[in-house]
Image (spheres, rainbow, N blue to C red):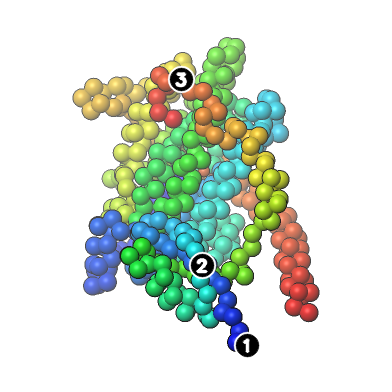
Amino acid sequence: MYAQLVETGAAETSEKDREFQEKIDRGVRIEANDWMPEGYRKTLIRQISQHAHSEIVGQLPEGNWITRAPSLQRKAILLAKVQDEAGHGLYLYCAAETLGISRDEMTAQLLSGKAKYSSIFNYPTLTWADIGAVGWLVDGAAIMNQVPLQRCSYGPYSRAMIRVCKEESFHQRQGFDIMRQLCQGTDDQKAMAQDALNRWWWPSLMMFGPSDKDSVHSEQSMKWGIKQNTNDELRQKFVDQTVPQAEWLGLTVPDPDLAWNEAKGGYDFGEPDWSEFYEVLKGNGPCNRDRLAARNKAWDDGAWYRDGLIAHAEKQQTIAAE
Amino acid sequence: MSKEWPLWEIFIRGQHGLSHRHVGSLHAPDAEMALKNARDVYTRRNEGMSIWVVESAKITAFDPDTAEQNFAAPKSKVYRHPSFFEIPDDVGAM
Ligand SMILES: [Fe+2]
Ligand SMILES: [Fe+2]
Ligand SMILES: [Fe+2]
């Protein structure tokens, strides 16, 4: 999802580990100063920082359309949405910092390409309809994933998720609203919406990560209460919720295998191209290089400003001390 | 004349999973005493499972007189609320 393929390492079984597991099983939240297994700490740092990086990098595909939004109101709305994502990144970085990693360390990991972020943000936003599709599908998928994370066993992460979830509904709705307006517009506008759905559908399904049978770390994460649902469960929920919305819009989901399965009370659907997913994670998606270059440029270009503010603060302290 | 103890602001986590919330303040000579006093003053009926103390003088706040200008901007940004977008009922949960 926003954190994909998060490694957990192997679980240990000391007395302390057992007590910890009992706490988790009783549904007690873990806080920063509580004892925790190293594997739990490291897994959370990986997951929360990856989630934070995704929020930050996720600003880029949408930011691409701020200056070209079709009206002043759409521009203000998109600006507010992207601003929210920056906030989500900050809540999450702070939650990760409670586990003993510094903000600069995390930033360095992102900028060097060592840290991962969600595969979805390595796809380009080619038309205005993509902004609709991203809000509707990508934020929609993010909500699916983030709602259960509100009950994550780690207190600071769960509380950050509660804040984030409150803000996400606006994101998905503004996206759907863009799609709706295009679909009720001219033939060309509707074709643009269909084209965006065609390009974003499969990458959105990939956001949930590979099937659980291929997801080696899922089991430990679920035992630790870091993860509540399997990747496949969430993907199924997403498809079941989204397909009727596509139909409502009069759009066609680009999956020939899509069919309602009365027996299971959900849709059957095709398999995403996982080789594409792994290529994108490796850095070979359409926009990986652009995204990293943009983050590095922002960091480098902002250096004088960060340094200037610190210099000012230090000067004020010296003056106050005199 | 002896020196007055500084004032401390007290934050308590009432239940696991919740964030610490401000409950009040008290005087104490140092942080450790502030913690102990806070435990005795504010959690006599099991109201807490964790306490934070912060010296009141270390807290920075806006001047209340500037509240109008500080918090005015979001009032015009109604689109930040999901209810701004009308989603027909038959579209389903969103
Ligand atoms: Fe997001
Ligand atoms: Fe977000
Ligand atoms: Fe969002």
Q: Earlier in the sequence, mark 1 or mark 3?
A: 1
Q: Residue furthest bottom?
A: B1
Could you say which disc has been placed on residue B25 in the image? 2
Q: Is residue A51 left or right of residue A125?
A: left
The reply to whether the residue tagged 1 has its Cβ within 8 angstroms of ligand 2 is no
- Image point (63%, 88%), residue name: B1
Which quadrant does the N terminus of chain A fall into?
Answer: top left
The reply to whether the residue tagged 3 has its Cβ within 8 angstroms of ligand 3 is no
Q: Earlier in the sequence, mark 1 or mark 2?
A: 1
Residue B44 seen by the camera:
yes
Q: Residues within 10 Å of mark 2 (few under 14, many from 20)?
A: some
- Image point (51%, 78%), residue name: B28
Q: Nearer the viewer, mark 3 or mark 2?
A: 2
Q: Where residue B78 sits in the image (x, y, percent)?
A: 60, 33
3D distance between C-alphas at marks 3 and 2: 49 Å
Q: Earlier in the sequence, mark 3 or mark 2?
A: 2
Residue A299 seen by the camera:
no
Residue on which disc 3 sits: B88
Q: Nearer the viewer, residue A52 or B51?
A: B51
Three-letter residue code for mark 2: Ser
Q: Nearer the viewer, residue A41 or A23?
A: A23
Regarding mark 3 in the picture, which secondary structure is present there? loop
Q: Is residue A83 left or right of residue B39?
A: right
Regarding mark 2 in the picture, which secondary structure is present there? strand
Q: Residue furthest front?
A: B1
Q: Residues within 10 Å of mark 3 (few under 14, many from 20)?
A: few
